[in-house]
Image (spheres, rainbow, N blue to C red):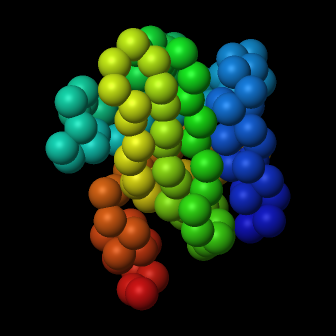
């Protein structure tokens, strides 16, 4: 299952970067949970595909172009996939570039949970995979 879960996350990032909202949304479980992210402006936990899709749209609204690119190897751990990404964007204000590590929980080929961490070590520790 691990490689299939990695493939789901690759497809998720590809759909995001292609701005294929239909394919992107279809990779979210209907009851997906986007866990609160400490230090993020909208720091509440989101539940459900519609709530998550609204958040993705809000995050993109200020940018004419953006992309999320993996900058580490994907790490598969059971039903979870960990990857550090760079999110770069240009638009109505200054260019933006940030790095974060995301832990995705995949169930039945859909993303069931999204957890973000500023540091890779934090994400790995949360999974019991110390660096």
Drawn side of residue 108 relative to residue 50, left or right: right
Q: In the rendering, at what x and y percent does residue 87 appear? A: 49, 42
Residue 44's quadrant in the figure?
Answer: top left
In the depicted view, which residue is nearer to us: 3 or 112? Answer: 3
User: Residue at position x 49%, y 39% from top?
Assistant: 88
| Residue 2 vertical position relative to residue 16 in the rendered view, above or below | below
User: Residue at position x 44%, y 58% from top?
Assistant: 101
| Residue 115 vertical position relative to residue 127 in the rendered view, above or below | above
Residue 36's quadrant in the figure?
Answer: top left
Q: In the rendering, at what x and y percent does residue 60 appear? A: 47, 20
User: Residue at position x 57%, y 23% from top?
Assistant: 65
| Residue 123 vertical position relative to residue 67 in the rendered view, above or below | below
Q: In the rendering, at what x and y percent does residue 85 appear? A: 52, 54
Q: In the rendering, at what x and y percent does residue 112 appear? A: 56, 41
Residue 16's quadrant in the figure?
Answer: top right
Residue 65 in sight: yes
**Screen quadrant of the N terminus:** bottom right
**Screen quadrant of the C terminus:** bottom left
In the depicted view, which residue is nearer to us: 37 or 94? Answer: 94
In the depicted view, which residue is nearer to us: 82 or 70? Answer: 70
């Amino acid at each position: 299952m691990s490689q299939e879960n990695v493939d789901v996350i690759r497809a998720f990032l590809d759909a995001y970067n292609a701005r294929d909202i239909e394919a992107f949304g279809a990779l979210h479980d209907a009851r997906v949970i986007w866990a609160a992210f400490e230090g993020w402006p909208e720091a509440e936990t989101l539940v459900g595909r519609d709530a998550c899709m609204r958040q993705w749209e809000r995050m993109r609204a200020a940018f004419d172009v953006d992309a999320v690119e993996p900058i580490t190897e994907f790490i598969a751990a059971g039903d979870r996939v960990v990857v550090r990404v760079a999110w770069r964007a240009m638009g109505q204000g200054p260019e933006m570039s940030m790095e974060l590590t995301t832990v995705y929980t995949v169930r039945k080929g859909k993303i069931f949970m999204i957890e973000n961490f500023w540091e890779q070590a934090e994400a790995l520790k949360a999974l019991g995979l110390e660096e």
